[in-house]
Image (cartoon, rainbow, N blue to C red):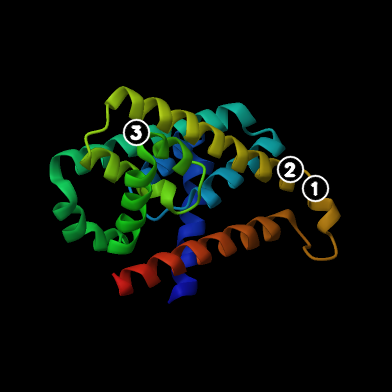
Amino acid sequence: MTAKIVALVASFVIATISHLGYGGIVLLMALESACIPLPSEIIMPFAGYLAATGAMTLWAAALAGAIGCQIGSLVAYYIGAYGGRPLVERYGRYVLFSHHDLDLADRWFRRHGNITVFVARLLPAIRTFIALPAGISRMEIWRFNLYTFTGSFIWSLGLAWIGMKLGSHWDTLGPYFHRSETAIGAFLVAGAAWYLYRHLKSVKRG
């Protein structure tokens, strides 16, 4: 079952970006930042690979990723601001969101303040959920937008750059992969497997 879910996630990411281009990046990153389990660790490296092939540009892909994060984060922010923690705890499990995820993001926010929104955007896992405690605390919206966009752009650019560099060196992986598509698939599936395993485990605990 897990293998099927991983394959489905990877196929969805590839198909969406392949068909919608930059709009697909915006859509997928918006979903990820709205606490839907679509890992940016898969989305942006694949966009970077497309940049290596000339189908996209690195900077435009990173910008699309940051815009998507901004949109999704605002959705999560307003859910937190107007629904509060009870709403998140009640319905979060339907998108693989557990109490553990919220507790982690909440601790970071209370401990480090508003700057956490920027720092968290550079960290795996916690970056997806940090908008919720920011909304619950009614963080100033202009500051939230500034920190979210800046951190998300850096994150998106870094992941896309890795994907671009990995894509430009497929020939050096010849002994291990016969085709570049195989390498992409292996990379995406490994990332999706880790991400989904963590969330499924958290939901069972939560």
- Examine the rendered structure and indicate whether residue 94 appears above or below residue 72: below
Between marks 3 and 1 in the image, the one whose residue lies nearer the viewer: 3
Q: Amino acid at mark 3?
A: Ile
CA gap between label 3 and label 1 equals 33 Å
Neighbourhood count class around disc 3 (C-alpha, 10 Å): few under 14, some 14–19, many 20 upward: many
CA gap between label 3 and label 2 equals 28 Å
Task: Tell me the residue at 36%/46% (across/down).
Answer: 111
Q: Which mark is residue 169?
A: 1
Q: Amino acid at mark 1?
A: His
The local secondary structure at tag 2 comes to: helix
- Examine the rendered structure and indicate whether residue 171 appears above or below residue 117: below
Question: Quadrant of the image for the N terminus?
Answer: bottom left
Find the residue positioned furthest to the bottom: 1
The answer to which of 158 and 19 lies nearer the viewer is 158
Question: Quadrant of the image for the C terminus?
Answer: bottom left
- Provide the residue designation for mark 2: 165
Neighbourhood count class around disc 1 (C-alpha, 10 Å): few under 14, some 14–19, many 20 upward: few
- Say if mark 1 contacts mark 2, CB within 8 Å: yes
Tell me residue 73's x, y (percent).
Answer: 34, 38
Nearer-N-terminus badge (3/1): 3
Task: Tell me the residue at 32%/45% (across/down).
Answer: 110
- Provide the residue designation for mark 3: 71
- Examine the rendered structure and indicate whether residue 92 appears above or below residue 66: below
Residue 69, picture quadrant: top left
Task: Tell me the residue at 66%/36% (across/down).
Answer: 51
Nearer-N-terminus badge (3/2): 3
Tell me residue 125's x, y (percent).
Answer: 45, 54
